[in-house]
Image (cartoon, helix red, strand yellow):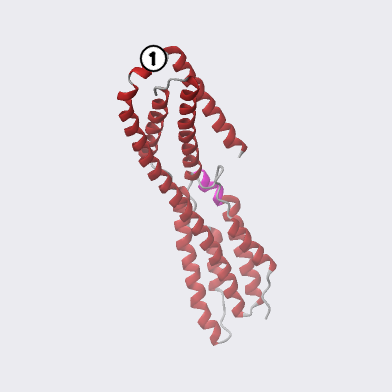
């Protein structure tokens, strides 16, 4: 939060300094003379910026929300596989499954999240994921109930792979370069327009430039932060993984 405030304060101060310098150098008369003619231009730029900013914000928010849901589902599937293990009443299976599930969670939280934050690919068939499959393959049936539960566990394991693939894709997807450039261009156009607005009083001119500048700066900061869900003010923390890990560590399956 402190870093965000300092970034905002620096950019806002820079904009106000430029605004005051422009006002002092050119004087207010040149802007007041054409203020009526410039109004429609300012309106078009403002409308275009609003539409583009709304589209960009909607896109990054959807991506952020989708990734959050995928992380929650992935951790839920891990918990489900752990719960299915209880039906087999096998202490060795329980110990092995606990070990591989915790390894999977630790790998995801400690390494994979960092890789996704740096837009680096994460191996879909990780050794931790494969280890879970090997434990499932080693299950031996003791009664009819085991044969019923086993396909359900297999399906959960397959669903885990699907969610894992979607999570990795969503975690590395960023705002396209062309859309980012377009958003930056209209942000600069709107900020520049505020510098040549016609105000009689300097204090009102500074207020107008500062207000529009604050909107542009904050919008850009929010977009940049949410475009990388694993960093910045809106950092997406894998809380559900921590909860699942705590649940697995704190529970024990008894025969």
Q: Quadrant of the C terminus?
A: bottom right
Q: Quadrant of the N terminus?
A: top right
Q: Residue at x 63, y 67 (%)?
A: 98
Residue 234 showing in the rendered view: yes
Query: On screen, 25 above or below 11?
Result: above
Q: Position of residue 130 (x, y in %)?
A: 52, 63
Tell me the residue that label 1 is attached to. Answer: 29
Q: Of residues 207 and 18, which is closer to you in this image?
A: 207
What main secondary structure does the magenta stretch of the protein show?
helix
Membership of 152 in magenta stretch: no
Q: Of residues 244 and 120, which is closer to you in this image?
A: 244
Query: On screen, 157 above or below 19?
Result: below
Q: Position of residue 200 (x, y in %)?
A: 43, 20
Label 1 crowd (10 A; few <14 / some 14-19 / many >=20)? few
Q: Secondary structure at mark 1?
A: helix
Q: Position of residue 199 (x, y in %)?
A: 42, 22
Q: Residue at x 61, y 56 (%)?
A: 106
Q: Which region of the structure is painted magenta?
A: 112-119
Residue 125 showing in the rendered view: no
Membership of 118 in magenta stretch: yes
């Amino acid at each position: 939060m402190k870093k965000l405030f300092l970034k905002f304060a620096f950019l806002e101060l820079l904009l106000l300094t430029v605004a005051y310098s422009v006002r002092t150098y050119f004087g207010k008369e040149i802007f007041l003379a054409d203020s009526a003619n410039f109004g429609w231009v300012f309106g078009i730029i403002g409308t275009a910026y609003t539409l583009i900013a709304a589209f960009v914000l909607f896109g990054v928010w959807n991506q952020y929300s989708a990734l959050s849901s995928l992380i929650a589902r992935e951790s839920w599937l891990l918990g489900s596989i752990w719960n299915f293990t209880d039906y087999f009443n096998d202490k060795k299976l329980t110990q092995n499954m606990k070990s591989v599930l915790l390894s999977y969670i630790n790998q995801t939280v400690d390494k994979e999240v960092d890789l996704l934050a740096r837009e680096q690919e994460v191996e879909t068939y990780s050794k931790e994921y494969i280890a879970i499959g090997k434990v499932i393959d080693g299950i031996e049936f003791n009664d009819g109930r085991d044969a019923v539960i086993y396909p359900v566990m297999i399906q959960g394991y397959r669903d885990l792979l699907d969610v894992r693939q979607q999570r990795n894709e969503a975690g590395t997807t960023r705002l396209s370069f062309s859309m980012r450039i377009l958003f930056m261009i209209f942000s600069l156009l709107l900020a520049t327009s505020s510098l040549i607005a016609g105000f009689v009083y300097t204090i009102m001119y500074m207020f107008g430039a500062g207000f529009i500048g604050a909107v542009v700066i904050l919008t850009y900061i929010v977009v940049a932060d949410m475009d990388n869900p694993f960093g910045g003010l809106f950092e997406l923390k894998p809380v559900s993984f921590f909860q699942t890990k705590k649940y697995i560590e704190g529970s024990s399956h008894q025969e």
